[in-house]
Image: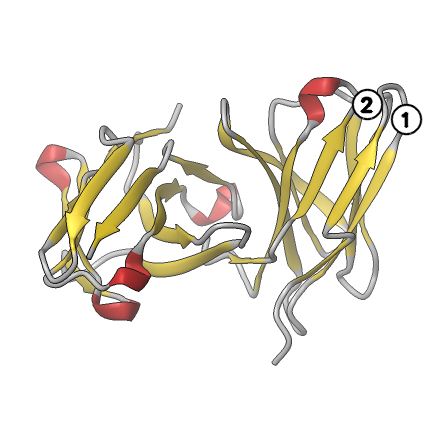
Amino acid sequence: KAGVTQTPRYLIKTRGQQVTLSCSPISGHRSVSWYQQTPGQGLQFLFEYFSETQRNKGNFPGRFSGRQFSNSRSEMNVSTLELGDSALYLCASSLEITGELFFGEGSRLTVL
Amino acid sequence: AQSVTQPDIHITVSEGASLELRCNYSYGATPYLFWYVQSPGQGLQLLLKYFSGDTLVQGIKGFEAEFKRSQSSFNLRKPSVHWSDAAEYFCAVGGIKAAGNKLTFGGGTRVLVKP
């Protein structure tokens, strides 16, 4: 069974640009969560989608948004990038509401 | 609000020695507790989880953890460390089912293994 796939793995953007990251969950998993990981703030919850509906949202500005498609694939978007958005963005999928998350390898975003 | 504290930022242990990583949590109800491991450049892998029942839980790679409600702790242990255990370890707490799959993570403990 394929794991969680995130694309792209690495990307470099400049301030003010926007970025879209993609996540394909494990087949059959309907919950997809996104986390931001930085050296200073650690792992922080961004949002969770379940059956195309946002179920939870973390404390991030409105520049961070996401969506989930009918096939459970998810995308997150960050608009008007700031230097502080440089981070590893991790996607995780889950079969049900158990908290047992399966993580992808992440998308490392560098903002210059 | 829920929170997780991992008091040790770095731990260095000799190969073959025992390892214990500390985790303290704050949560208003019965928590779901997890330990994840992250190798450099990789995502997080679940080591073990506690939902209810037996307070000593076994995980993968020879790890175990003990839930102590009175101390709000969920410490991770391994009797004999291998060089491949060098990684960063994260404790996490989740809520009741209605809260969905939102996890709160501790700051992590980086484990270095000496030959």
Chain hosting mark 1? A
Residue B19, visible in the rendered structure = yes
Q: Nearer the viewer, residue A45 or A19?
A: A19
Labels 1 and 2 touching (C-beta < 8 A): yes
- What residue is shown at x 84% (from left), y 20% (from top)? A15
B3 relative to A50 in the view: left or right: left
Question: Residue at left 73%, top 32%?
Answer: A110
- For marks 1 and 2, the one nearer the N-term is 1
In the picture, which quadrant includes the N terminus of chain B? top left
Residue A17: which numbered mark, if any? Answer: 1
Q: Position of residue B111 (x, y in %)?
A: 28, 45
Q: Quadrant of the C terminus of chain B?
A: bottom left
Label 1 residue SS: loop
Above or below, A55 against A97 in this view is above
Q: Tell me where residue A100 appears, x and y as whole percent.
A: 45, 58
Image position of A4 (left or right of B18):
right
Q: Give the alpha-carbon distance from disc 1 to disc 2, as whole Å.
A: 5 Å
Q: Report whether mark 1 lies on the same chain as mark 2.
A: yes
Q: Chain of mark 2?
A: A
Residue at 81% x, 23% y is A81
What label sits on residue A81 in the rendered view? 2
Three-letter code for the amino acid on which mark 2 is drawn: Leu
From the top left corner, tell me how far across and down residue B43 is, in percent: 53, 53
Residue positioned 32% across, 53% down in the render: B86
Kind of residue at disc 1: Gln
Above/below status of A56 relative to B20: above
Indicate the quadrant where residue A19 lies: top right
Tell me how the rendering is colored.
secondary structure
**Residue A63 location in percent, x, y?**
80, 23
Compared across the picture, whether B61 is left or right of A90 comes to left
Total tally of numbered discs in the picture: 2
